[in-house]
Amino acid sequence: MVGGGPAGALLAFHLARDGAAVTLFDHSHPREKPCGGGFTPRALDLLPAEPAGDPLPLRRVHTCRFDSGAGDAVELTLPRAVGIGSRRLVDAWLLRRATEAGARHVSERVRAVEPGLVRTTSGREERYDLLVGADGASSLVRRSFLGPLPPDRLAMAAGWFARGESDMVVRFTPGLAGYLWLFPRPDHVGVGICAPLASVPTRRMLTRLETEVARSFPALGDDEAERYAHIIPSPGTDAASMLEIAGADWALVGDAAALADPITGEGLYFALRSSVVLAETLRAGGSPRAYAERACDEFGRDLVKAASLRARFFAPGFASRMVRYARRSPAVRAVLADLVLGTQGYLGLKRRLVRTLPRFLWQMAHP
């Protein structure tokens, strides 16, 4: 297995616990990954049990403020808490669970993968029956078997980690087809912004973020904090983009499989869920190809639907209308909260909105 982030570590945990001989190559631990670090409740439900002396290093957050970027905002109370933490600490926690289950961690960089063989930069060679790419958005395994992702399936995120405190905030950024976020971690705040890769230069994104933070959240404008940037990959509008993620003796999970939500950019749940689906498929005697089909059926078609809806979500005026409606209607706030938590899928979104319409109209007429 190449990559020891959440997808790789959780898969290694399950396979090793099932008795498989698992070697996990990852040279980068301990590391801080540049992302929000938010685990939705459904993502938390997929994690191993917390040992008595080794609790999950997360901060639990029960509210989220949505800001249209045009002067309107609404505070959402989340039915279940989101856990937010440093990826350096959370990833290390998951890797400990994997090695305790019997997985072998090799702290070396993989430089090449060939049919049946992995080579590292130190000259190590190891043969495999199944190779899993869990090595992120720039996955070597993916490039070796499929080639690079097309630019229209990539978004760019940039930001910094700031000292201080903050609420959880999501602010849309008119003109960028994206949003900025403040994610409060246990001892600092993740400050970031994202937009489609080809839409705006990274430097311009960072300038927009710095300007917005200086105006609205000046305590988090840490000029000394190192700036980061990273790519967020997601499926395309065709289900074939999901079915490509496995072959006869290889499979991709997490960012390597391009499984982030095209609208929200949330990828941690799909990283963990893809690992569970692959482990369950192998446990049942299925092939990696069967994993791709099952992943497509269980959550992939919803991601493909999200890809087709993304332009509408970031169309001019949509965020302002959504926030205004949510301020006046508990029914709309409930839909928005469920979208944040991932419990409302995109395939069923239109049906739910239609069912909500009578109550929404009554609430708008009787504020």
Image: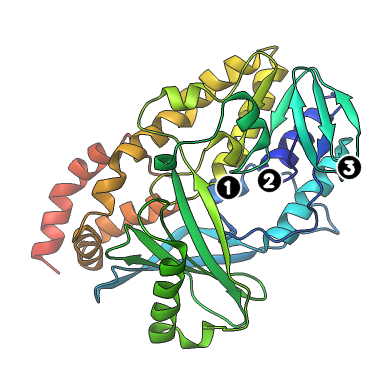
Render colour scheme: rainbow
Q: Which residue is mark 3?
A: 100
- What percent of the width, then of the height, locates residue 72? 25, 73
Q: Indicate the amino acid at tag 1.
A: Leu
Q: Residue at x 70, y 12 (%)?
A: 285
Contact, CB < 8 Å: mark 1 with mark 3? Answer: no
Contact, CB < 8 Å: mark 2 with mark 1? Answer: yes
The answer to whether residue 315 is left or right of residue 224 is: left
Cα–Cα gap, marks 3 and 2:
15 Å
| The N terminus: image quadrant | top right
Q: Indicate the amino acid at tag 2.
A: Pro
- What percent of the width, then of the height, locates residue 352? 26, 41
In which image quadrant can residue 29 be found? bottom right
Mark 2 secondary-structure assignment? helix
Q: Residue at x 25, y 61 (%)?
A: 319
Label drawn at residue 6: 2
Q: Residue at the far left: name it.
A: 365
Cα–Cα gap, marks 2 and 1:
7 Å
- What percent of the width, then of the height, locates residue 342? 44, 47
In which image quadrant can residue 152 be found? top left
The answer to whether residue 276 is left or right of residue 315 is: right
Residue 342 shows up from this direction: no
Q: Check the image and report above or below for 212 versus 84.
A: below
| The C terminus: image quadrant | bottom left
First in sequence: mark 2 or mark 1?
Answer: 2
Q: Which residue is mark 1?
A: 268
First in sequence: mark 1 or mark 3?
Answer: 3
Give neighbour class at mark 2: few <14, some 14-19, many 20+ (Cα, 10 Å).
many
Q: Check the image and report above or below for 97 versus 282.
A: below
